[in-house]
Image: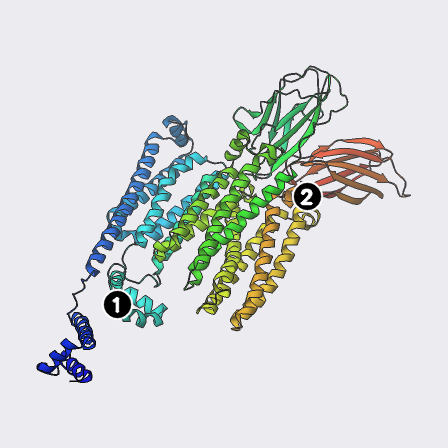
Amino acid sequence: MTCSEAREALSAWYDGEGPALAPGVRVHVAECDECAAFERTLDRVGDVVARAAIPATTVPDLAPRVVRRAGRRRRVIDRSLQWAVGLAGVVELATTLYYFVRGDDDAGHGTAHALAHAMASGHAAHEGHEAVALTVAVCVALLCAAFRPRFSRPYLPVLGVATLLMVVASVHDVDHRVVSVGHELRHTGLLVGFLLLCLVAARQPRDPARTGLLLAWRRPHEVERRLRVVSRSAATAYARIVRPLAPGASRCWPARWARIAAATALAAGLVLVAGPAEAHAVLEESSPGSGAVVQHAPATVVLRFDEPVTLLPTSLQVIGPDGRRVDDGAVDHDGDRTTTAAVGLSDATRKGTYLVSWRVVSADSHPVSGAFTFSVGRPGEAPTAPATSSNRGVGIGLGVGRWLGYAGSALLVGGLLFLVACRPRAEGRGVRRLLLLGAGLVGIGAVVCLLLKGPYDADLGAGHLVDGTLLREVLGTTYGAATLGRIALALLGALLVLGRSRLSPGARVAATGVLTVALAVCFALAGHAAAASPRWLAVVVDGVHVVAMSVWLGGLAMLLALVVRHRGEDAMAVARRFSALALGAVVALAATGAYQAWRETRSWGALQHTTYGRELIVKLVVVVLILAVAASSRALVWRHADLSGLRRTVALEAVGVVAVLGVTSALVATEPASAAYHPSVDANLTILGDTVQVSAIPNGDRSMELHVYVFGRSGEPAEPKQLSATVADGALGPLPVTLAKAGPGHRQGVVSVPRAGDWTLAVTLRTSAIDQDSADVTLPIR
């Protein structure tokens, strides 16, 4: 038997085609090594085929276990939120009833005060009782929603309106100093309870039929795709049983409005906690007064301003006639009055003129400085103030810190909002790096501003960067609290970026909204909005302005990193979504920017003749150029053009917005034009045939130096029989203006008024015993 015949017989037997092997085959295999190796190969192949034929073990169904575990976790979260809502309602109810029974409207007032107030004003007491009744009703509603969560969603409209009105009333009363901030902090429990109630309402299950109709109405193309994937795995079973909609589906309107209401209430609460603020600080009076001559040196020099000011260790210095400091260095408020600054004199025994140099921080976080002199015994030559170290580098560093904060906000907030609104399919590592870079820039910028603010306010150099006294003073201001809040929000933003993939779509939207509102409020309170009136409106406008800027610039960065660069399948769709989002951001920027420009300038002259106005003009020009580039980008997107052209226009647009951020950083540090603008007035009046020239030159805050010249019909200076002047603004006056003779037909005086505004100067000229007439001119006194 040949080898080929033996191997054919072996193959047929292993394949089951024959009953048994012939005896000759076995004899041949025993004698031939190659055929024996062939048989061993057939044995191994048979073992593999046999193992493959064994029936597969049944895979256990993990869907019930996943559903039970997810349901258990959901119940724990729901119970915790319900207990938190109930606790907030109990705390607010107990606080309200305690102060109502005690009759305490403010700290330090007892029942006797409340009864006296009620007897003096029955209507006021009745309104107070109505407010208490409303608060109790809201607390009871919170308790009912805690025990019966299904009531939470129907309660939202009523409780939302009540909470919003209470917050608005509280902000108004605090801003007008009707009540203190501490008094309104008692209502924090109500605000927290409403926020928790919004979360409870967002987690309540919806009617499946209504949810399906909503989905079919809003996204009909999604219905068929979702029906095809139902019950195919444990994950889809969890999505179908635990949640009425899959994570990518659209949420129904009550849950979305619950998140929006929660973010709005949180923003209002941050505004409430920040405290009241007024306008630019102005020195109203001093003791001793400017230019005063006293017989004996005072023990203390006291300055009073028109608003609360923050004091620094170098806020008040008194220089003696010999050029040495004579104050004791203990700068503090005079008693409990935060509108004052006082310092004691330790060595003011010499006769002569003393110089008082002051520098305080006003409510808008900007330093205000000035100087005046007074004399002891007899006037003498005024001393010169000691030289101070240059803080130009500190000012530049502070501007860089602000720029870093704005750029970080754009990357962090704008990037997160881009991901929420534009919904790109792929989020690579580059996106996470950009978001974390934004959080880092926000934190670094805040730290830089916090360290440099004290030396900048005190007009000191960078050597005082780690001065603990200056840092404590800064942390005690609204600016310091807002900057510290930015550091905390930067850390929370970084945690949100790192844990974003573990959150549900609804939680991502809610967390992004809260972070956006909180960061916008912190930026607003660190700028001019802190001293504007009404404060709540200025904070809202500034916050919207910052968010709109962040959406625009952050969206451009994400568009470059995620869409234009990688060119995903949905690149053009994402670009079109961002185009619509950017259009809304630009409209918001234009509206809020127009209001801010009007608030900070108030006149064309202030826009033209102040540093703030010139910087604002530069910003407007750059923005107009960027809008031209943005219009071309939008045209490319909607014409379905190639992405290479879009890359160039988007990059140019982003560079322009970065430049605008630099100008904005300078604007925040510049004194507003409405406060810095002190216009001069030159007018010619004709009175009784004579020409009266009036020249008014700014001479400090709420003061102008007045010069009046009288010329006869021949054009020569004429000496009038009597010349007088008064000022009035409608509610005040007429206030007399003392005029002293400075030459032939020339009178000179100073117009000092108690408040800034447009005052009417009335000039009265008498040429004879019976001939007398007057003429008016408007003086814009700032």
Q: Nearer the viewer, residue 649 or 426?
A: 426
- Residue 541 seen in this snapshot: no
Q: Nearer the viewer, residue 604 or 311?
A: 311
Report x, y in % for residue 599. Answer: 59, 48
Q: Determine the CA span between mark 1 and mark 2.
A: 69 Å
Report x, y in % for residue 99. Answer: 35, 32
On screen, 617 above or below 276? below
Label number found at residue 677: 2
The answer to whether residue 36 is left or right of residue 520 is left
Q: Quadrant of residue 620?
A: bottom right
On screen, 250 above or below 140? below
Q: Residues within 10 Å of mark 2 (few under 14, many from 20)?
A: many
Report x, y in % for residue 266. Answer: 41, 46
Residue found at the very far front of the displayed protein:
31
Q: Amino acid at mark 1?
A: Val
**Residue at (56% x, 59% y) in the render:** 654
Give the labeled residue for mark 1. Answer: 230
Colouring chosen for the image of the structure: rainbow
The answer to whether residue 481 is left or right of residue 632 is left
Q: Nearer the viewer, residue 79 or 298?
A: 79
